[in-house]
Image (tube, rainbow, N blue to C red):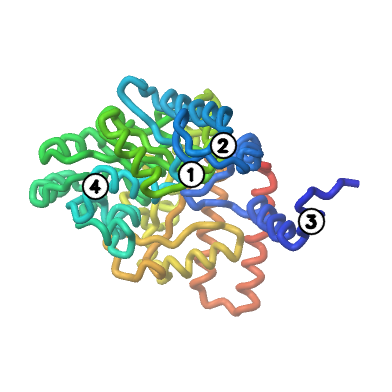
Amino acid sequence: MKQPSPLEAGDRQLAKLIDQERMRQEDDIELIPSENFASPMVREAMGSILTNKYSEGYPGKRYYGGNVWIDKVEALTQERALRLFKLSPKRYAVNVQPYSGSPANIAVYVALAPFGSRLMGMNLSEGGHLTHGHAVNFSGMAYNFFSYGVRSSDQRLDYTMVAKLARKHKPKILISGATAYSRSIDFKKFQRIAKSVKAIHMADISHIAGLVAAGQHPSPFPFTDVVTTTTHKTLRGPRGAVIFSKLEFSHAIDRAVFPGLQGGPHEHVIAAKAVCFKEAMTSGFRLYAKQIILNSRALSGELMKRGYHVITGGTDNHLFLIDLRDRGIGGKEAEQALDAVGITVNKNTVPPETRKPFDPSGIRLGTPAVTTRGMKTHEMVLIAEMIDEALSFFTSSLSRSRHLQVQKRIRRAVVKLARAFPFL
């Protein structure tokens, strides 16, 4: 008989909740593009005894004693991060301490722009992130943000408009990168715009970092002054973030992270980042990143064949948006309908958005997690069929009993497909 783990023996209530979430992940089809499945090695590092140690400061300059091995762990993580993106330590520095993507972005702003400065980022409703200047976020409260967006004709980035707005507002920092944009980003164009108005160019590649590292998306280096990224999503590591910068900006950024915004770094997570960077340097990861895009294109293509309005008409990366206005269903309803059959997506604003953020007009789908499980384009066809059937029956006039029967049938198909591709 299997012996219970320390958690199972000592806290059965919590252990049961964790096990239920494990079963949900195993039996559901995960299509939220910002989620992925970390490897056993990443999870082992995160659960290590490194969580016991306080290490305020940086390698070689800590507030507490006893950090000789912690310094080596953090230095190794820094070295791997630079090597992953082929960056020379003579030109670039990296801070691996940010707890997550939002604090990383805020740290850059605090380091390089006084409160009240003019900054520019992508509009949230058209693909940007909360920290790119939304009014309810610290970024929008502390800074005078101006937003750029996409063309109404094809929902693609309007670089001409970005340049026009930059000339008008002359931001201290120009932010490129997005959280819900399905096309390649031309960082070189952003750099030209930033240079023309003497702005610092910061790229937030949190969503596409794994694709960039694998050579499947144009790199922001060397067209940027600062690059931030999370380490999960397409990088498939722990929940955390890093900040890359040219050496001239590194001291100010380090001071903004600590002691400016954070205390003791989470060294167990930093160790897991080191594992993630090592995994991302393998040939297997490069094949994985390529398959993410193949799967994303296959899934979006199959849904377009079924009449769904995919924003921009396709995708160049790991995600895409579906505008559901012509289907008589909102994004929130679609998310719930798919949740009921075990397909996990997230409601999302789509341009031009006319509804509220918590009840938007569309949904966002991505393929990093299903690709980690080993699914390929054939499975994307099956998933598209399930999505279409679930949403079609949700808006149909079937009786409740008949609707539940269909829902259960789709759910069984989802579980069967998911269990054919175990990931733990």
Contact between marks 2 and 3 (CB within 8 A): the answer is no
Q: Quadrant of residue 297?
A: top left
> Which-is-in-front pick, marks 1 and 3?
3
Q: Amino acid at mark 4?
A: Leu
Per the model, the C-alpha gap separating discs 2 and 3 is 26 Å
Q: Quadrant of residue 267?
A: top right
Q: Residue at x 29, y 56 (%)?
A: 139
Which mark lies nearer to you, 4 or 1? 1
Q: Secondary structure at mark 1?
A: loop
Q: The disc labelled 2 sits on which kind of residue?
A: Ala
Which sits earlier in the primary sequence, circle 1 or circle 3? 3
Q: CA distance from mark 3 to mark 4?
A: 53 Å
Q: Which residue is drawn at the image coordinates 58% and 44% (left, top)?
A: 37
- Farthest residue toward the bottom? 399
Can you tell which mark lies on residue 272?
A: 2
- Res. 10 mark: 3
Q: In the rendered structure, which amino acid carries the disc numbered 3? A: Gly
Which quadrant holds the C terminus?
top right
Categorize mark 1 by other alpha carbons within 10 Å: few (<14), some (14-19), many (20+): many
Q: Residue furthest right?
A: 1
* Residue 232 coordinates in the image, percent (x, y): 50, 42
Residue 303 point in image, percent of width and height: 45, 53
Would residue 303 appear left or right of 196 to someone viewing this image?
Answer: right
Q: Is residue 376 visible?
A: no
**Label 1 near label 4: C-beta < 8 Å?**
no
The residue where tag 1 is placed is 240
Q: Secondary structure at mark 4?
A: loop
